[in-house]
Amino acid sequence: MPRPILASLDPSAVAHNLSRVRECAPRSRVWAVVKADAYGHGIEAVYPALASADGFALLEIGEAARIRALGWTGPILLLEGFFDAADLEAVLELKLTPVLHDDAQIDMLLGMRPSAPVDVFVKFNTGMNRLGYTDGRGRKAVERLRAASEVGTVGLMMHFPEADLPDGVAGPLGRFEAETAGLPGPRSMANSASVLLHPATHADWVRPGILLYGGSPTGDRDGPAFDLKPAMELTSELIAVQQLAPGEAAGYGQRFVAQRPTRVGVVACGYADGYPRHAPDGTPVMVAGRRCALAGRVSMDMLTVDITDAPEAGIGSRVELFGRHLAVDEVARHCGTIGYELMCAVAPRVKRRVGFGEAG
Ligand SMILES: *Cc1c(COP(=O)(O)O)cnc(C)c1O
């Protein structure tokens, strides 16, 4: 038998979540964000569920090539543009839509003299202070691009730093409107949080990522509270059970010390599978259909759970680290991180399966 850890993927959940985007932003086109191999889910696994999106957004040429290989002929947005001339050749060949945030990229693009016009977006920095133009330089970039015969459509884009907050978009939105006043071209602002919380930001194109996979973009509500369905379930099994007397401890550093006679279940899942090593005692883990608590430091290949209150649990019992019965967002909150990180962290050594199967 192979090691029992498994990441199951449910394309129908992704399709449901995309339909939530359509409900929330009915007048906008949708860039389905599939960077980081579809947030760890695998581009090929989610593609059929996302093929009714209007475009895909990602960072790497290799991922764009994989989407083209799946038969996608529509637009593909390169969120960080291109990094050098070799990239740019692939951008032209694959007919990608780069986001340009710097004059050096524009020089490179126009210097290439592409044979067919290239569609682009120009990135405006409205307070995130990572990528993008400020102080009227974005307008100059747009005007320069619009005058070049090598360039097709010139879109306008920005990214919110605090769209997860109820009043988090007004400032950047106002700055974007001022910087782009009177400029034609399609506009794109909204990530998942804005899709769900801020209709005023939806504009021509929305760019949801995490919500497509059923994760929440906000710290205070889990995905299901937004009627999102989890697309990934990380499961394993108990491979051993230990009986601890009060005062006995479990795992490296002996972090968990039994306060009562305690049954400890040993799960085939560790940080080398992508489960966070910094998960504290008490982090929820589903064992045999019951919520139990992590007990002891996560090791490389195993973790330990207090299963005293799940007397039916034993070797071979099903363990859900996150999924349909335990939101990834809740596990992430215990670990001081966000669902995005846990999804993206699932390691290559974890087998993937399409479909959630029977053992719900
Ligand atoms: C990742 C990313 C998104 C998607 O963000 P979510 O919070 O996952 O919806 C949108 N826009 C840009 C520029 C991104 O980098």
Image: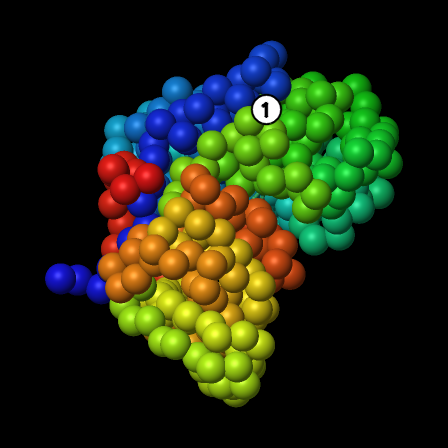
Please indicate whether residue 217 sits to the left or right of residue 244 in the image: right
Q: Where is the N terminus found, in terms of image quarters?
A: bottom left
Q: Secondary structure at mark 1?
A: strand
| Type of the residue with mark 1 | Trp
**Rendering quarter of residue 207:** top right
Q: Is residue 225 visible?
A: yes
Q: Is residue 334 left or right of residue 246?
A: right
How many C-alpha atoms fall within 10 Å of the one at disc 1: few (<14), some, or many (≥20)? many
Q: Residue furthest top?
A: 27
Residue name at image x 52 percent, y 30 percent: 228
Q: How many marks?
A: 1
Compared to residue 293, the image places residue 52 above or below, namely above
Query: What residue did someone put label 1 on?
Result: 205
Quadrant of picture, ligand 1: top right
Tell me: is circle 1 under 8 Å from ligand 1: no
Residue 349 appearing in the image: no
- Residue 48 position, x and y percent, is 31, 28
Residue 68: percent from left, percent from top: 30, 35
Q: Residue at x 70, y 43 (%)?
A: 220
Q: Indicate the quadrant containing the C terminus: top left, top right, bottom left or bottom right.
A: top left
Q: Which one is nearer the viewer's eye here, 159 or 267?
A: 267
Front residue of this view, candidates 267 and 102: 267
